[in-house]
Image (tube, grey):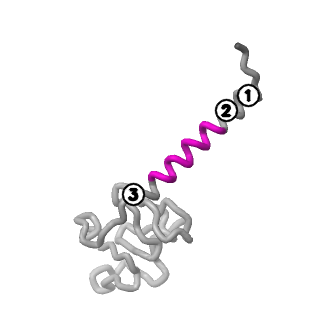
């Protein structure tokens, strides 16, 4: 059986799409980070950036939140998305932690 280039390309795109959608669905099922999580406590994670202890985390500045951090693996408009700082658990877009680095 001879496979044409067109059939190969169409099949490849279909398989790649399936993997991409499957991995996105896996992220949607990832647990959300709790503020009581040991890693969250070590990094000062707050689900609401307005509740960050500014005396303890002098690095924090208004306007910083997970949604505009380079580690946030979703769109800024996503309410939650995975973060590698928390083993790819989901963090709140409006959250903050001391690992914050402004997205370029």
Image height check: is 48 above or below 36?
below
Disc on res. 11: 2
Q: Residue sitting at 26 percent across and 64 percent down?
A: 39
Q: Which residue is mark 3?
A: 30
Residue range of the region highlighted in magenta in the rendering: 14-26
**What is the residue that sits farthest to the front in this orientation?**
1
Q: Secondary structure at mark 1?
A: helix
The structure residue drawn at horizontal position 53% and vertical position 68%, both measured from the top left corner, is 78
**103 vs 6, nearest the viewer:** 6
**Disc 1: which residue:** 7
89 is within the stretch colored magenta: no
From the viewer's perspective, is residue 81 above or below residue 27? below
Q: Is residue 17 magenta?
A: yes
**Where, by quadrant of the figure, is residue 40 drawn?**
bottom left
Where is residue 34? Give x, y as percent: 30, 69
- Vertical placement of residue 30 versus 15, above or below: below
- The residues tagged by marks 2 and 3 sit, at their Cα atoms, a distance apart of 29 Å
Dominant secondary structure of the magenta stretch?
helix
Q: Quadrant of the N terminus?
A: top right
Q: Is residue 57 above or below residue 81?
A: below
- Give the residue at x 65% y 33%: 12
Residue 35 x, y percent position in the rendering: 29, 72
């Amino acid at each position: 059986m001879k496979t044409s280039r067109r059939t190969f390309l169409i099949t490849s795109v279909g398989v790649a799409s399936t993997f991409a959608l499957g991995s996105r669905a896996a992220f949607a099922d990832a647990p959300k980070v709790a503020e009581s999580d040991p890693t969250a406590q070590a990094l000062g994670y707050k689900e609401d950036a307005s509740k960050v202890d500014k005396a303890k985390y002098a690095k924090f500045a208004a306007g910083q939140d997970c949604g505009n951090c380079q580690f946030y693996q979703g769109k800024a408009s996503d309410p939650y998305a995975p973060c590698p700082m928390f083993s790819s658990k989901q963090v709140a877009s409006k959250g903050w932690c001391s690992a914050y680095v402004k997205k370029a």
